[in-house]
Amino acid sequence: MVKPDAPGLLARALGAKGWVPQTVTLSGNTDPYQPVERRLALTRRCLEVFLEFRNPVSLITKNALILRDLDILGAMARLDLVHVMLSITSLDAELIRVMEPRTSAPPLRLEAIQRLAGHGIPVGVNIAPVIPGLTDEEIPSILEAASARGARAASYILVRLPGSVRSIFVEWLERELPEKRSRILNRIRDTRSGNLNDPHFNTRQKGEGEIAASLRSLFSLSAARAGIQGSWPELSTAHFRRPSPGQQELFDR
């Protein structure tokens, strides 16, 4: 589903009298740099709106296409309006090819971190999803590689399998990694109180139990060893402004 009017709708929302300047995340559910973004440029146009209004944005993506928008991101960074997280699941290019076929290869994601950092844009790495029994052992190497390229922050998210995602993931394991299927599913269950998914807000991101605790410890120690110990710089709402009505109409085109 595509929302071609997103930039115009965003401009009207930010221009409303009731809007309180605050950080907006692009995006929590869908990667803002999917392949179709090359043609539609909806994310780029939305970033132009955010820059025009001087409203801060946090981006998270698995695609190096974000480098296309270095000019806008650089301008936003100079006003403390943006930070970026590159999600890296694995450094194994073959695994990524079969697991995340429409995303950038690991070397390209690392290059994106380096170039973003080189342009003064605060950038971090999000190890997601961490799949116990498959990708968890890569946490130290991912953090080390990202830190070496300028990542200033790091996080991780344990694999989540809500709704239909569960059957899709199990079918993928059976097709691509049948020899590891049982081990992976059993380890996921060990982090989800015997289930493959946990809908509870306080535990769904990191899991519970011994394996989940080991992952938290591994991540914390590895981040410290890689030198990623700082927090994000605070994004600013001090520059927020509302353009004139004539200017806002430009975003509807």
Image (cartoon, grey):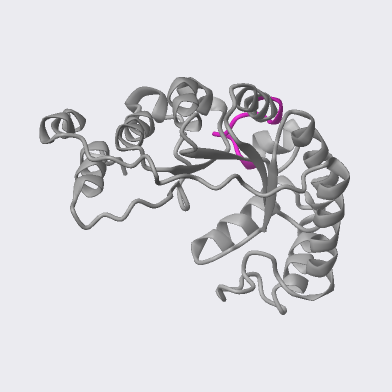
The residue shown at (35%, 37%) is 54
- Quadrant into which the N terminus falls: top left
How far across and down, in percent of the image, does residue 69 sit? 46, 24
Most distant residue in the front direction: 238
Closest to the observer, 35 or 78? 78
Q: How many marks?
A: 0
Closest to the observer, 53 or 156? 53
In the picture shown, does residue 163 fall above or below 11? below
Question: Over which residues does the magenta segment extend?
Answer: 99-108
Closest to the observer, 242 or 125? 242
- Does the magenta run of residues contain 102? yes
The residue shown at (26%, 54%) is 19
Which quarter of the figure has residue 206? bottom right
- Quadrant into which the C terminus falls: top left
Most distant residue in the bottom direction: 193
Q: Is residue 103 left or right of residue 189?
A: left
The residue shown at (67%, 75%) is 195
How far across and down, in percent of the image, does residue 188 sit? 73, 66
In the picture shown, does residue 177 fall above or below 54? below
Q: Is residue 245 left or right of residue 242?
A: left
How far across and down, in percent of the image, does residue 79 sit? 46, 33
How far across and down, in percent of the image, does residue 224 sit? 84, 49
The secondary structure making up most of the magenta span is loop
Which quarter of the figure has residue 107? top right
The residue shown at (82%, 42%) is 227
- Does the magenta run of residues contain 83? no
Closest to the observer, 29 or 59? 59
Q: Is residue 126 left or right of residue 34?
A: right
